[in-house]
Amino acid sequence: MSNKNKFNNIRMKNMIKYVAMAVSILVFTGGNAQTKEKKVGLSKSKIAINSYVGKEISNSHDAEINKLISQMTLEEKIGMLHGTTMFSNGGVPRLGIPELKMADGPLGVREEISRDNWAPAGWTNDFATYYPAGGALAATWNSEMGYTFGNSLGQEMRARDKDMLLSPAINIVRTPVGGRTYEYMSEDPFLNKKIAVPLIVGLQDNDVMACVKHFAANNQETNRDFVDVQIDERALREIYLPAFEASIKEAKAYSIMGAYNKFRNEYLCENDYMLNKILREEWGFKGIVVSDWAAVHSTAKSLKSGLDIEMGTRGKFNEFFLADKLIAAVKSGEVSETEINLHVKRILQTLYQVKAMGGQKRPKGSIATEAHYQDAYKIASEAIVLLKNENNALPLKLDGIKSIAVIGNNATKVNALRGFGAGVKTKREVTPLDGLKNRLPASIKINYAEGYLERYDVKNKGNLGDITINGPVTIDQLEPAKLQEALEAAKNSDVAIVFAGSNRDYETEASDRRDLHLPFGQEELIKKVLEVNPRTIVVFIAGAPFEIEEATKNTNAVVWSWFNGSEGGNALADVLLGKINPSGKLPWTMPKKLIDSPAHATNSFPGDKVVEYKEGILVGYRWFDTKNVAPLYPFGYGLSYTTFDFENAKSDKNAYTVNDKITVSVTVKNTGKVDGKEVVQLYASKPDSKIERAAQELKGFQKVKVAAGKSETITIQVPVKELAYYDVATKSWIVEPGKYTLKLGNSSRDIKKEIDVVIK
Ligand code: BGC
């Protein structure tokens, strides 16, 4: 069977599995689903296939595992509890125990790194598919894309013979300047989990462990090695933990990564509250806790607090906290061998679980295949967000267009293997310029000009890759000759497109940006190009918000693309030319100014030794909507080349009890001239609440494709328990009785229908 067929086969099997699952869930929860559907007139409706459930770690190999442990020396056991290469722990070859082989990362399988240092291993067979980054994936607002991402990447991991993907990275985007915003998914815990869970299930379906990171409260790069994060318990539970909790309870992630920083004065890799109490006791986690690289600070304490494997780069591998020092701690009686056995057993269980042991048949996988590039394309094309489109400037109508000016360094900038941290070595990264060349007819002339230069002020602390300090300083003066060239190109072309934004050197792990200004003189460039050619479209390639109001106020069209994978340029050209109707929605708020964002408005970023999250539960749009601060573009926002109406919105009942599911249905009518996809977003609001609440919170969403002039009815199910708040006094989730308003919109600020329900 060809790789492509094999791939389709697995996908088909998975599709069948999930359709079956969704149907059974409907039958189970609905009791007499048929009757109910009739009652509320949902017979033609589409039931969302969004129940992704992972497989529990099995203990069926425990007898073999116990036997193996009884045959191991103390040194062999402890070898399994720390890195013995850059990306694996120690195996025990004489007993058939392999190394647990790990790989980053967020954009696809990382290139192979040397066994004992960060230098690339120089392999020629580690080229992989570059997938759209986390922010892009979340911008699809499509759980199926989460599954596609995980499943496709899982196959690449197997082809590289890896056991554990160090992903997904699901920390909440607390501040727009966060260096890893591009890698993380969202400011909203619900969207976060609805993308993360299918991703993990898709990945682990290929017998590859997900290592969900960075657990937890790791929301800034500044001082990440030591900063002590103080979050009140309610915000912790409602904002920062839900996606982790769902990753464990629903997706059954087999591993999790402890973060660098401290939480309530304890490092997160030795944080008994987080690792033992919450993760294992409350959530029933059975997998393994792996440290972030060089994030461990103690021996006995880390182990007893729940850490299983110490990874990193700190000196020689035997000098790690969980290496020779741990052997000594066992010998001195500080740590018992029973404790060691517990951790070894967990690791062996996960190795059996992904069929890395016991001669089990395991998928061989495939890498950088056309099918995988197409997965990357699909995700990329659903991720692109149309922010502004006046006078129908887009899609570009090519009649009468003889030339297009393509301006900006970002038209040709590659991002897959850039920046500090994990990248992907790939043979395919279609840049925006390549994409236009691929898609435009040969008769149209492309006049390319670099426009601005990507330059950093290295003397003024602008070094790239400085660890955990403020981000690079950019040089924002335009080169006169480059500007002139760009203006000539714009003047001499029928249309101009400026590619601005950022890149993975500027937005990067290990530093947060200093502010949200557009770097490298882009604002001036955009304005000057507009002066000479009013038909100028602005496209941003970036993974995080920027202050773009001033730069874009006179353009008719603004498009937001991302670090959008191997096929990013093709997807972008297809959006610009109308082959793809954009359906991406912002996974975070685009503020007008940085100071409008909650962490900055409350002056609680980045802290020094301690950072207190003073905004509490009011993260992202929760802050903007509750405090009535107008964003530039709200959470969930994104335009289409068509328009949609929401009609006939209703719930299946008026009153519910706490164990019910609320089924909301709405008909989405495509009132324009082209087919398109819309995301119906459901926000819940309880204005008369006795406790502090955000003005509204996302509790459901569904993307739906609707043909021009046609209608589709969709349903969204909201378990009443989703409406609960965390009550700190009783340490429990409480659904406050009374009236709730369910708001249906296509962004958090464009609510089209409201339904009132009562919870008894
Ligand atoms: C990052 C992790 C990554 C690890 C290994 C750390 O610096 O925080 O996300 O998985 O390096 O590359």
Image: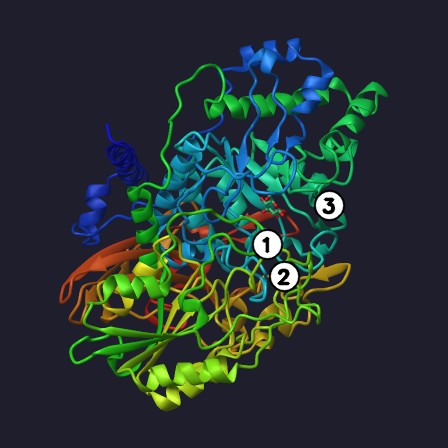
In this picture, residue 448 sits left or right of residue 254: left
Pick the front one: 412 or 641? 412
Which mark is first along the chain, 3 or 2?
Answer: 3
Compute the Cα span from label 1 to label 2: 8 Å
Mark 2 vs mark 3: give the one in front: 2
Q: Please name the amino acid that badge 3 sits on.
A: Tyr
In this picture, residue 749 sits left or right of residue 67: left
Place of residue 87 in the rendered image (x, y in percent of width and height, measured from the top left) = 59, 35
Is disc 1 surrounded by few (<14), some (14 to 19) or many (20+) residues within 10 Å? Answer: some
Which mark is first along the chain, 2 or 1?
Answer: 1
At 20% across and 79% down in the image, what residue appears?
401
Which mark is first along the chain, 3 or 1?
Answer: 3
Q: Is mark 2 within 8 Å of ligand 1?
A: no
Mark 1 vs mark 3: give the one in front: 1
At 57% across and 18% down in the image, what residue appears?
97
Residue 53 visible from this viewpoint: no
Compute the Cα span from label 2 to label 3: 27 Å
At 54% across and 45% down in the image, what residue appears?
244
Say the numbered circle drawn on residue 420: 1
Compute the Cα span from label 1 to label 3: 23 Å
Q: Image height check: is 188 above or below 67?
A: below
Is disc 2 surrounded by few (<14), some (14 to 19) or many (20+) residues within 10 Å? Answer: many
Say the numbered circle drawn on residue 267: 3
Place of residue 642 in the rendered image (x, y in percent of width and height, measured from the top left) = 22, 70
Say the numbered circle drawn on residue 464: 2
Residue 370 visible from this viewpoint: yes
Q: Please name the amino acid that badge 2 sits on.
A: Leu
Is disc 3 surrounded by few (<14), some (14 to 19) or many (20+) residues within 10 Å? Answer: many
- Among the 4 quarters of the image, the one containing residue 758: bottom left
Place of residue 219 in the rendered image (x, y in percent of width and height, measured from the top left) = 61, 57
